[in-house]
Amino acid sequence: MNNPKPKATIMDDVAMRRAVTRIAHEILEHNEGADSVDLVGIVSRGVPLADILSREIAEIEGKRPSVGKLDISFYRDDISRSIAPVLHATNIPFDINNRNIVLVDDVLYTGRTVRSALDALMDFGRPRTVQLAVMIDRGHRELPIRADFVGKNVPSSHSEDVRVHLKEIDGDNSVTIWDKAAMPAKGGNR
Amino acid sequence: MLSVRHLIDTTSLTADDITQILDTARSFAEINARKGIKKVPALRGRTIVNLFLEPSTRTRSSFELAEKRLSADTLNMGGSTSSVVKGESLADTIQTIDAMNVDMFVVRARLAGTPQKITENTDAIVINAGDGKHQHPTQAMLDLFTIREHFGQLDGLKVAIVGDLAHSRVCGSLAPALKTMGADVTLVGPPTFLVDDPSYYKCPQTSDFDSVIPEMDVVYMLRVQLERMEGAAIPSKREYNRLYGLDLRRERNMKDNAIICHPGPMNRGMEINTEVADCARSRILDQVTAGVATRMAEMYLLLGGDNDGISN
């Protein structure tokens, strides 16, 4: 395929920044400040997103939440079908016991990634609460999971793919919708 | 996904395979070092049979821990408790266990070629945990992991493998794996322990230990396997130690950043002296730690990558 193009760009840099600012305020409102909150990004795009959120919260509240990263490769329920080729280390350099942990990911789809992330997170301790923040909720849940904080709800079809691009990984901030048939290979794994 | 279905020898592994095992092992090393729960559900519901037809403590416990930390179900079968002792053929034993639908055999055997033979009698995946004087591939992977952790890469490193080369399955796996990854391997041992066919390893062989020491990045001491000698000649423990043992005098001639490895169990005072085994260069305990992580990686990659037809 020559120069594959997305069907549509649904968020640009400005829209994504506004969404992050709003989510940061919502997290602070929900948890009555930043004191009890830590963020955990799901590898790979959840990690830079968690960093951005943490900086945003620091700007509002003056206190920066800790950020950890969680690789869920070994907790997936489908390794027999798609073995993760690229592995990234999990690193949660703080105690999650009794904390309010906000899991951060780019796209919420079937809910299976979040299910795995919950399992992985619980191996590190017993948080007081676990909340979920995502940039995009595209529907099609296969498990009883919902997000607490959403950048944008994007109704999509199974034949489409929704991609969040982040400066830290992809060079630009945007959200695009693709026809699965016309898609270029993905960088990183979700 | 690895290019092989079973892990029988290191000669079948490509550089990509080895890199994938070592990279995956890094993630498992992180899990093994956790303060919290040192266990992931990656192989939940898979059944692994540890078939140890020859005594083994460290390899067996390393595999068992690796399996448990992957949440696999395990079945241990030993030499003296198995029906092989009652006269059942190995093929019958394997087919019987296979009929119970297991996913993997981990095989340690006195006879070279046993793991390969087992692959012909089962649909399960087979890992060679050491067969006779042939191969011990999981040992080689933990050695490579340990060396790579210290130097950051394997390409271009100079490694001396010292001792009982002819009887050593450790050398049989380690030398080709190091070559595949671009390291320079020199085999060192008394003339009676050198390999008959030097072209097999494509490595230079020498009996002059002292002359090679100053060039080496890694000095890998093999265990003198008194139980596998079958009359092979070494004059005495003391003379062996003087000519081929790693003592403080030789350790001082090593490069600044060079390290010492040994597959264990050590014959202290024979191939390695106590003050050297416990010195700062020694990576012997790191090798043991690496064993669990690399075995987790091998089992994860072999069991995860081979079920394209199964959907869930």
Image (tube, rainbow, N blue to C red):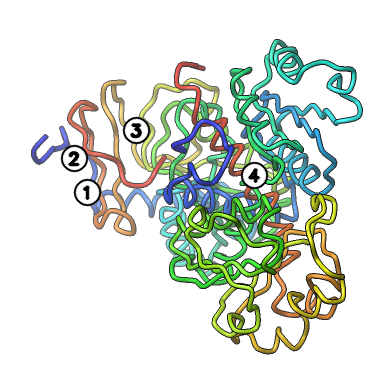
Which one is in front, B88 or B35? B88
Instruction: Kindly indicate whether the residues beneath marks 2 and 4 are on one polypeptide chain.
Output: no
Q: Secondary structure at mark 1?
A: loop
Mark 3 vs mark 1, CA separation in Å:
15 Å
CB atoms at circles 3 and 4 under 8 Å apart?
no
Residue to which mark 2 is pinned: A9
Q: Secondary structure at mark 4?
A: loop
Q: Earlier in the sequence, mark 3 or mark 1?
A: 1
Residue to which mark 1 is pinned: A12
CB atoms at circles 1 and 4 under 8 Å apart?
no
Q: Secondary structure at mark 3?
A: strand
Q: Amino acid at mark 1?
A: Asp
Q: Amino acid at mark 3?
A: Asn
Examine the rendering and report whether any part of residue B48 can be seen: yes
Q: Which mark is residue A153?
A: 3
Closer to viewer: mark 3 or mark 4: 4
